[in-house]
């Protein structure tokens, strides 16, 4: 027997319009549960219908828009998957919708690129490479400046928690130059200068992501109060190669290097929480000596710059956001690489056997509280390896045969270190304006009141009756009237699908007996698992 719930058959002591509505909603819930348990798609009630989505048969795809149905989860969702991949070199970008390019004309005069977080994204994955140091002179007198490898740039990665519309400043380290073949300057972004017009390599610049408007130049010389919280990630630059005299051969250089102490002239690797000391495979801030004297610049750490080499001719230590330099006399010393704390410049011992040394490597940084899953890698000497993670296919400027970034086989005519690179990427489901409209259901008589139940699951944080708007039509979809939705709790437990209920007076609509419901979704992503509509 089929019984229609009306005010006439509700107990008179409690029978009110509210009781009718309450029982109508309960019938919708029971109908939904029956549809779920018995695998029904559209379950017809007396003066009502339940559509627990198992397919798209209960909706009118011609009337809807952007209504993406998920067959594996049996729901509609108002979101599309978007992937972002924005790369930055020293003067160009790969993704113009979110990014603007910076410019790196020289040390200390660079301008930052900018990245704007798109709508719907709350985190960005970052991979960053610092620049390699320039090569030094294997002969020590400016005759073959490319033989001594600069240190490879460091690598850092991490995930930055953010919000849509946030703007980041992006600095990309420039590879250090070789003194004989080009002007002497460190990579823009804080690499230290090489100290001579002959025989020495400049330090490579660091790469960094900072808050919009936070200039690293504020920190050069002394840490700027309040600047560190504005720094998210830094990849340290490699130290410049020094000059030294050839006294034999070395297979790593194709017969162009010394056997006695030339191995100690190359620049220290950038990256790691502490950069490498020049000419050595040790991550340390103090300058070191091989074979005698404090000749190789130390690497930067998380709290101090690398020590400058102390010998005949002064070299400066590195510091907060800059690499150490050497004086301008012909001392054939490599400049320090830039970093969170830069590294010290290399030294000069005054005799061929004491030689001319490389600068140390700058440190990387990922200690900002907004950064998670941070890690960093160093690259050892310029002739043994290159950038940390240089083989990553997402690095758009891979290691070449130039000093500072690759296995060295023989001198070339350009020993500039490889430039750095910054890559920001993320995937997100972004809300789209979506309309879902049901097919028409024939009413036995003309209805004046409609009650709707929506089985909804939050993905974002939607606002009812703004981001989720329900409406009902009795004239086949020509005229719709909004129903005010209320949150009536969860289907089961304390999470998952919510029960949204609402009702509306449709007596003012044109005459008709073809019922339709419509959902308009916007601004925040939701999943719609089913809809029940009743009328009377």
Image (cartoon, grey):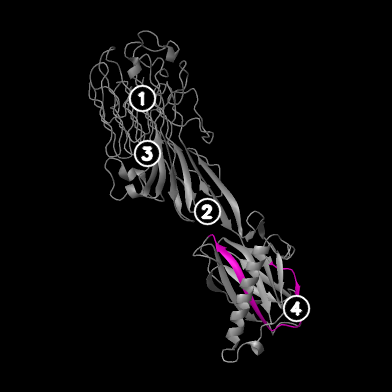
Residue designated by label 1:
267
In the drawing, what numbered circle is on residue 81?
none
Label 3 – label 1 distance at C-alpha: 21 Å
Res. 135 image quadrant: top left
Q: Is residue 439 magenta?
A: yes
**Quick check: 26 left or right of 414?**
right
In front: label 3 or label 4: 4
Q: Secondary structure at mark 3?
A: loop
Label 1 – label 4 distance at C-alpha: 83 Å
- Please report the bounds of the magenta region as a residue range: 437-459
**Residue placed at 58% from the left, 85% from the top?**
18
Residue designated by label 3:
108
Let me know if residue 208 appears in the view: no
Q: Secondary structure at mark 1?
A: loop
Nearest the viewer among 319 and 522 is 522
Residue 4 at x, y percent in the picture: 69, 82
Res. 178 image quadrant: top left
Q: Is residue 42 above or below residue 293?
A: below
Residue 100 at x, y percent in the picture: 51, 46
Residue 502 at x, y percent in the picture: 59, 76
Residue designated by label 4:
443
Residue 480 at x, y percent in the picture: 68, 76
Q: Quadrant of the C terminus?
A: bottom right
Q: Secondary structure at mark 2?
A: loop
Q: Earlier in the sequence, mark 1 or mark 4?
A: 1
């Amino acid at each position: 027997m089929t019984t229609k719930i009306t005010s006439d058959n509700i107990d008179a002591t409690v029978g009110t319009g509210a009781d009718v509505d309450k029982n109508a909603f309960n019938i919708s819930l029971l109908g939904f549960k029956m549809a779920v348990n018995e695998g029904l798609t559209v379950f017809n009630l007396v003066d009502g219908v339940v559509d627990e989505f198992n397919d798209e048969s209960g909706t009118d795809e011609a009337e809807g828009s952007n209504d993406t149905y998920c067959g594996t989860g049996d729901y509609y969702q108002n979101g599309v998957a978007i992937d972002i991949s924005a790369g930055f070199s020293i003067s160009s970008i790969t993704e113009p919708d979110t990014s603007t390019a910076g410019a790196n004309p020289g040390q200390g005069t660079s301008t930052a690129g900018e990245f704007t977080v798109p709508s719907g994204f709350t985190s960005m994955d970052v991979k960053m490479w610092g620049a390699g140091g320039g090569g030094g002179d294997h002969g020590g007198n400016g005759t073959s400046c490319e033989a001594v490898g600069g240190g490879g740039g460091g690598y850092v990665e991490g995930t930055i928690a953010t919000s849509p519309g946030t703007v980041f400043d992006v600095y990309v380290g420039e590879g250090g130059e070789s003194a004989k073949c080009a002007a002497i300057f460190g990579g823009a972004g804080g690499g230290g200068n090489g100290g001579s017009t002959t025989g020495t390599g400049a330090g490579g610049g660091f790469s960094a992501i900072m808050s919009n408007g936070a200039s690293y130049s504020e920190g050069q010389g002394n840490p700027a109060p309040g600047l560190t919280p504005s720094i998210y990630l830094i990849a340290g630059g490699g130290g410049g190669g020094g000059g030294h005299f050839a006294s034999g051969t070395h297979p790593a250089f194709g017969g162009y290097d010394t056997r006695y102490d030339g191995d100690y002239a190359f620049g220290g690797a950038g990256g790691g929480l502490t950069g490498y000391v020049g000419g050595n495979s040790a991550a340390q801030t103090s300058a070191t000596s091989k074979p005698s004297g404090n000749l190789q610049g130390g690497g930067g750490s998380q709290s101090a710059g690398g020590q400058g080499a102390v010998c005949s001719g002064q070299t400066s230590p590195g510091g907060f956001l800059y690499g150490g330099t050497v004086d301008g006399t012909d001392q054939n010393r490599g400049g320090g690489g830039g970093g969170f704390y830069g590294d010290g410049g290399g030294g000069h011992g005054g005799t061929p056997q004491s030689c001319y040394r490389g600068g140390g490597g700058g440190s990387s940084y990922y200690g900002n509280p907004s950064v998670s899953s941070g890690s960093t890698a160093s690259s050892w000497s310029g002739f043994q390896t290159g950038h940390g993670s240089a083989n990553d296919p997402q690095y758009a400027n891979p290691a070449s045969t130039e000093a500072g970034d690759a296995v060295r086989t023989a001198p070339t005519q350009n020993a500039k270190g490889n430039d750095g690179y910054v890559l920001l990427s993320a995937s997100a489901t972004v809300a789209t304006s979506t309309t879902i409209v049901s097919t028409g259901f024939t009413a036995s008589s003309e209805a004046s009141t409609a009650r709707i139940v929506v089985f909804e699951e939050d993905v974002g944080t939607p606002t009812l009756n703004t981001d989720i708007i329900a409406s009902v039509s009795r004239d086949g979809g020509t005229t719709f009237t909004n129903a005010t939705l209320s949150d009536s709790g969860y289907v089961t437990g304390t999470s998952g699908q919510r029960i949204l209920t609402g009702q509306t007076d449709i007596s003012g609509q044109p005459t008709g007996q073809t019922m339709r419901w419509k959902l308009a979704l916007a601004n925040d992503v939701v999943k719609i698992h089913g809809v029940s509509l009743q009328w009377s």
